[in-house]
Image (cartoon, grey):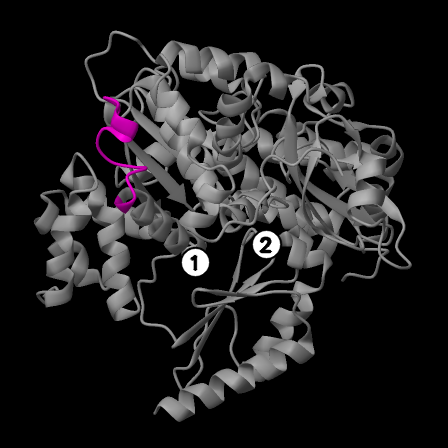
Amino acid sequence: MKKFKFSPEFNTRVAATVARYPRADAALIPLMQEVQRELGHFPEEAAQALANLLGISYARVKGVLTFYTMFRREPGGRYLLQVCRNLSCHMAGSVKLLEYLKGRLGVEEGGTTHDGLFTLVAVECLGSCGTAPVMMVNDDYHENLTVEKLDKLISDLRAAAKAQK
Amino acid sequence: MAEQILLKHKVVSLDGYKASGGWTALEKATRMEPAAIIDEVKKSGLRGRGGAGFPAGLKWSFIPKDSPKERYVVCNADEGEPGTFKDRELIRMNPYLLIEGMAIAGRAIGAKTGYIYVRGEFAREAALLEKCVGEARVAGFLGDKLFGSDFSFDLHVHKGAGAYICGEETALLESIEGRRGQPRLKPPFPAVEGLFACPTVINNVETLAAVPAIIEKGGAWYAAIGAGKSTGTKLFSISGPVKKPGVYEAELGIPFKTFLEEYAGGMAEGKKLKAVITGGSSVPVLTAEEAMAVKLDYESLAAAGTMLGSGGIIVIAEGTCMVDALLVLAKFYHHESCGQCTPCREGSGWIEKALRRFEEGGARHGDADLLLSVAGNMPGRTICTLADALAMPVISFITKFRDEFDAHAAGNTCRMGHK
């Protein structure tokens, strides 16, 4: 396995993160989140490196990595689209939104578009049922969605990505 | 509208919070004996707003007085019960209220440190809390020797990483400790051996946010609001086809009918009420007739065979296929089962599989009874209550809407035209 090197920025944050807990190993999840924030996903090699850093087993890190759904083990698109499929969103038409996105983006659930812009997933309750149907784009909630709103949102995101290139 | 305690002020700055009367309860608490604070909370009758409804003051009183160990206050902001979105609203409305409530809880149980466990998806709310904690620290409302007393208290925000089960209090503790969120066997209860094996109080956001008003105005004042043993106000989140879905603070004991019509504006245009889930997706469903006759408090809902739970009300309209709705929920619980206990891990999978046959064709005669049998064998046989949380909707949906399940099985199709 390739040796993983933490970024200098990550290294400067370790001490402050660990200091929030009485035991260093409790900082595991926030540090994993930090790696993912920097890289967009949590690579396999980082699991061993983090285990070494905190003095815990590789199995423990891997166990945490595979338990929590927000950790992404593979690189994904620049925009992670998470469509809520739970009851309130379901009743408000989330199935239709998901089908629309699959068609427009040409991907199945879990898939990433060829241009690397979008990864599409269906997720469980996002805790925003009053504004159903709801989808997250990275850290942001998009609420009271309709196919028309989604259509515009996808176009806007594509335009924003193009402008940044 | 009734008394507003939690959503009274929209507070966006530390100065605004001070101007709204913030921190006076904490200052008062620093001059009170810890036992007197616990007594006041006991007197208020405040019960856990996360779902279980356990009396908060009693929970605090279980912290051993003579333990030489550290103690911790943990806030459960892992809001994920389908139909529930009140804690996010409360954090956005007034994050300082939670911070002050936690500090008072810290004073009451002798804790120096607290953690706010926020679900990972609430990145904006976690950032807001971090900002507010930082400001409170700088202004001296968190940190060493608060208000010149010997009481010191500080807070940390801990973000979840995507797991419904972490809303279960012991799974949440495992998660803060940097492990998989698998619930622990109880006893020992967290009050004796909780976070980092130390005495710990864990309360929901809404529970802790109610504390400052109780300390400021007294337990008796709070106990006079509400109905009987269901004291105080409650945040209800209402979703589904109603005119004004959202979060509303109402006195416990308000009739569902009043709440639906006066707060949520009634059913959306052209929609007729079919069923109601009153306390988040885990509680037994009520028919329209049952719901229109019930009051929203712990006792009334228990008498009606369901629960107040988190106060997450999901309204279901005529025309909604109950088999399809139950399949959505079964898929969720199957996905979220942590996998430790066989009845939950396997049972949730079997239930999803059998329900799929009803929706997609291939349901066999007797499958409805099979579902009831599987669901009936799950509760009480597992470490936590996630199994119960699936069994309750399964049993109530099938018992109360049996004709829909039988029609699916007989016709091998959904008469609502889903598949």
Up-down relation of residue B168 to residue B68 (above or below): below
Can residue B315 be spotted in the picture?
A: yes
Provide the residue span drawn in magenta. Answer: B138-152
Q: What residue type is labelled 2?
A: Ser
Q: Is B273 on the left-hand or right-hand side of B18? A: right
Q: Which of B178 and B29 is in front in this view?
A: B29
Does the magenta-highlighted stretch encompass residue B195?
A: no
Residue linked to disc 1? B124
Q: What residue type is labelled 1?
A: Arg
Q: Which of A142 and A83 is in front in this view?
A: A142
Residue B270, image x, y percentages: 91, 59
Check disc 2 and report its element: helix, strand or loop. Answer: loop
* Residue at x 67%, y 15% (from the top left corner): B229
* Same-subunit check for callouts 2 and 1: no
Quarter of the picture containing the N terminus of chain B is top right
CA distance for labels 2 and 1:
13 Å
Check disc 1 and report its element: helix, strand or loop. Answer: helix
Up-down relation of residue B163 to residue B74 (above or below): below
Secondary structure predominantly adopted by residues drawn in magenta: loop
Return the chain for callout 2: A
* Residue at x 65%, y 59% (from the top left corner): A131
Residue linked to disc 2? A128
Question: In the figure, residue B287 lies in which quadrant?
Answer: top right
* Residue at x 69%, y 45% (from the top left corner): B326
Does the magenta-highlighted stretch encompass residue B139?
A: yes
